[in-house]
């Protein structure tokens, strides 16, 4: 079983990161409605999470674990909203006919593809950072 002070540090790291991610998403939402703020939040969160996961993958102590919890679980978890993306696409397609569904579905597909490509690029960047640090 983990040391209780260490557990509280982990919970605090996630809470602080979550608060920062929530503030960032609120700031993006204030810039406008629609898919663009959601896309920006999801792609930014995906990039940060992929870089962190790759860069912090090996070694490290308690400080690196707290960073991963704060930035990954907390901030990126609060910042990203793939469910919000799907809800926005559903909102765009609500009164639509079958022919009108093509554009929102293409937007959803583009968002998912961008997220996947961002994750791959973030993983590669994190690997470079990790390998540079190891030398």
Image (cartoon, rainbow, N blue to C red):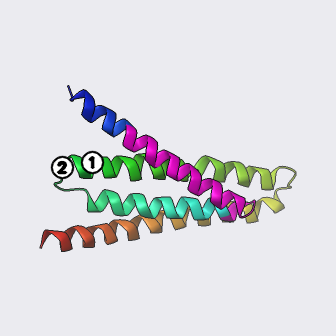
**Most distant residue in the left direction:** 135
Q: Position of residue 19 (x, y in %)?
A: 52, 46
The residue under the point 33% across, 51% down is: 68
Q: Which residue extends farthest front?
A: 5
26 part of magenta stretch: yes
Pointers 1 and 2 in contact (CB under 8 A)? yes
Give the labeled residue for mark 2.
61
Q: In front here: 6 or 52?
A: 6
Above-or-below relation of 58 to 123:
above
Judged left or right of residue 129, residue 51 is right
What mark, if any, has residue 65 been given in the picture?
A: 1
x, y percent for residue 70: 39, 48
Q: Is residue 49 magenta?
A: no
- What's the magenta region? 12-36
Residue positioned 61% across, 63% down in the render: 39
The residue positioned 25% from the left and 35% from the top of the image is: 6
Q: How much space separates mark 1 and mark 2, taking CA atoms? A: 6 Å
Query: SS for tag 1?
Result: helix
């Amino acid at each position: 079983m983990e040391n209780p002070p260490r557990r509280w540090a982990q919970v605090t790291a996630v809470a602080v990161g979550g608060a920062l991610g929530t503030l960032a998403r609120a700031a993006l939402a204030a810039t406008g409605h629609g898919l663009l703020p959601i896309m920006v939040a999801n792609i930014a969160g995906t990039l940060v999470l992929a870089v962190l996961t790759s860069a912090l993958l090996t070694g490290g102590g308690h400080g690196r674990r707290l960073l991963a919890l704060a930035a990954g679980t907390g901030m990126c978890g609060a910042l990203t909203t793939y469910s919000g993306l799907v809800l926005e696409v559903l909102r765009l397609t609500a009164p639509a006919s079958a022919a009108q569904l093509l554009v929102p579905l293409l937007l959803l597909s583009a968002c998912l593809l961008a997220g996947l490509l961002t994750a791959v690029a973030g993983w590669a960047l994190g690997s470079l950072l990790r390998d540079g640090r190891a030398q």
